[in-house]
């Protein structure tokens, strides 16, 4: 069986690795650029699973599947590749600024307990004792999720690619998909690329924002729109608070992510296109995210900005994210795209879902 995967961000790479476990499949992955260059390279890798407000249905199941899989996937990839994947196992701490929010967190904690997961509600005394770096007059408590994680999305993607190569997967970078010769048939069995034509029994479109143009070539346009996210890396000469307890801290949709030593990632903005479909990075928005992080952890005011970066997240228009489905009109073309802000989180569950669609 020949499988072609279009797109090698974290989702395409995860699918390639998942399918490489099955004997007898020939897998080729195409991307017009190097791996993890688009939205993956801009992500902060905060895996908001247990602490998310999703409690049932597919949205929760996919999160749970991914959080469970990451515990085995990271050591598995490190053993195969010899690469170190930064993987913070110290959980996520969500700061609460409103009393009614704390009540909804208590309800969620009870639900998670019944589901076999753990969430802790901390009052301000416990928060001050464990995370003295957090100091904001309006914070009324926090929720600690010890089983959620944070990882480096680029390191993860490169390890997935290398591990898949070990299993015989072919990656073709710098190759553009030009079209599909037989779009009239119910099965699309070949792809025209800048490196020539290849045949495939299954085609998986995991191209993020590129998915719109690719599905348009198949006369089944899936509308994926860009949403810009900006982030920055700052450096202190020491870690915030207790150096032995460095969870990812989040509040008011701002993440403060420890990445080793006194370095932290802060982000990310959410910026929608203008009428001209352009999204110029808004420096004021990025600065407001930095100021919000400083309001939560005042010591960050003295941190030096090492770098800033941005990336476009793929958001499906008029339908929920992500899009994991058969492409209408084709029996062998699958979509794994439009993950918006959850590509890294949902990559393992997406890979599993694609595998189940092929081998149902």
Image (cartoon, rainbow, N blue to C red):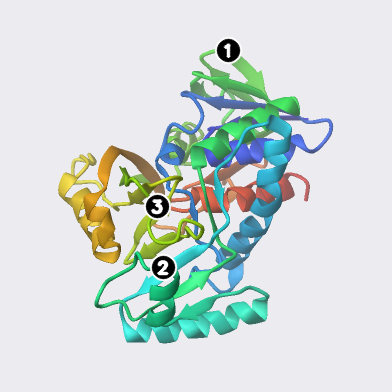
Using the image as rendered, state which of residue 267 and residue 40 is in the foreground. Answer: 267
Q: Front-most of 182 and 269? A: 269
Q: Which residue is mark 3?
A: 239
Question: Residue at 25% across / 61% down in the picture?
Answer: 298
Residue at x-position 67% and y-position 59%: 68
- Residue at (43% x, 37% y) in the render: 41
Disc 2 target residue: 131
Query: Is disc 3 surrounded by few (<14), some (14 to 19) or many (20+) residues within 10 Å?
Result: some
Res. 348 visible in picture: yes
Q: Looking at the image, is mark 1 or mark 2 earlier in the sequence?
A: 2
Residue behind mark 1: 196
**In front: mark 3 or mark 1?**
3
Check the image and name the residue furthest to the right.
Answer: 23
| Residue 313, above or below 296 | above
Camera-near label (1 vs 2) is 2
Distance CA(mark 3)–CA(mark 1) = 52 Å
Residue 285 numbered mark, or none: none
Total label count? Answer: 3
Q: Which callout, 3 or 1, points at the residue further toward the start of the chain?
A: 1
- Image check: 283 left or right of 264? left
Q: Position of residue 327 (x, y in %)?
A: 57, 44
Question: Do the residues bearing badges 3 and 2 touch, measured as CB atoms within 8 Å?
Answer: no
């Amino acid at each position: 069986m020949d499988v072609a995967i279009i797109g090698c961000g974290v989702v395409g790479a995860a699918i390639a690795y998942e399918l490489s476990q099955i004997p007898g499949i020939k897998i080729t992955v195409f991307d017009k650029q190097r791996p993890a260059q688009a939205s993956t390279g801009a992500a902060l890798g905060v895996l908001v699973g247990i602490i998310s407000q999703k409690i049932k249905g597919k949205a929760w199941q996919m999160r749970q599947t991914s959080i469970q899989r990451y515990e085995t996937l990271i050591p598995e990839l490190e053993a195969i590749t010899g690469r170190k994947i930064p993987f913070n196992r110290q959980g996520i701490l969500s700061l609460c600024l409103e009393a009614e929010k704390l009540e909804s967190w208590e309800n969620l904690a009870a639900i998670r307990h019944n589901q076999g997961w753990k969430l802790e509600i901390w009052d301000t005394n416990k928060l001050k004792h464990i995370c003295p770096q957090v100091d904001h007059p309006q914070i009324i408590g926090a929720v600690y999720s010890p089983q959620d994680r944070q990882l480096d999305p680029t390191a993860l993607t490169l390890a997935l690619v290398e591990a898949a190569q070990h299993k015989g997967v072919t990656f073709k970078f710098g190759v553009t998909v030009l079209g599909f010769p037989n779009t009239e048939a119910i099965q699309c069995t070949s792809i025209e690329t800048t490196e020539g034509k290849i045949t495939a029994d299954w085609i998986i479109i995991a191209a993020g924002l590129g998915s719109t143009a690719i599905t348009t070539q198949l006369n089944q346009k899936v509308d994926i729109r860009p949403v810009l996210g900006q982030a920055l890396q700052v450096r202190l000469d020491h870690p915030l608070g207790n150096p032995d307890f460095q969870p990812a801290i989040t509040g008011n949709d701002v993440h403060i992510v420890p990445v080793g030593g006194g370095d932290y990632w802060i982000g990310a903005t959410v910026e929608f296109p203008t009428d001209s479909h352009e999204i110029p990075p808004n420096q004021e928005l990025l600065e407001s995210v930095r100021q919000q992080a400083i309001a939560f952890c005042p010591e960050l005011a003295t941190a030096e900005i090492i770098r800033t970066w941005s990336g476009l997240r793929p958001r499906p228009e008029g339908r929920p994210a992500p899009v994991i489905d058969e492409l209408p009109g084709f029996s062998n073309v699958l979509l794994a795209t439009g993950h918006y802000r959850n590509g890294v989180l949902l990559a393992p569950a997406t890979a599993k879902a694609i595998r189940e669609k092929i081998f149902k």
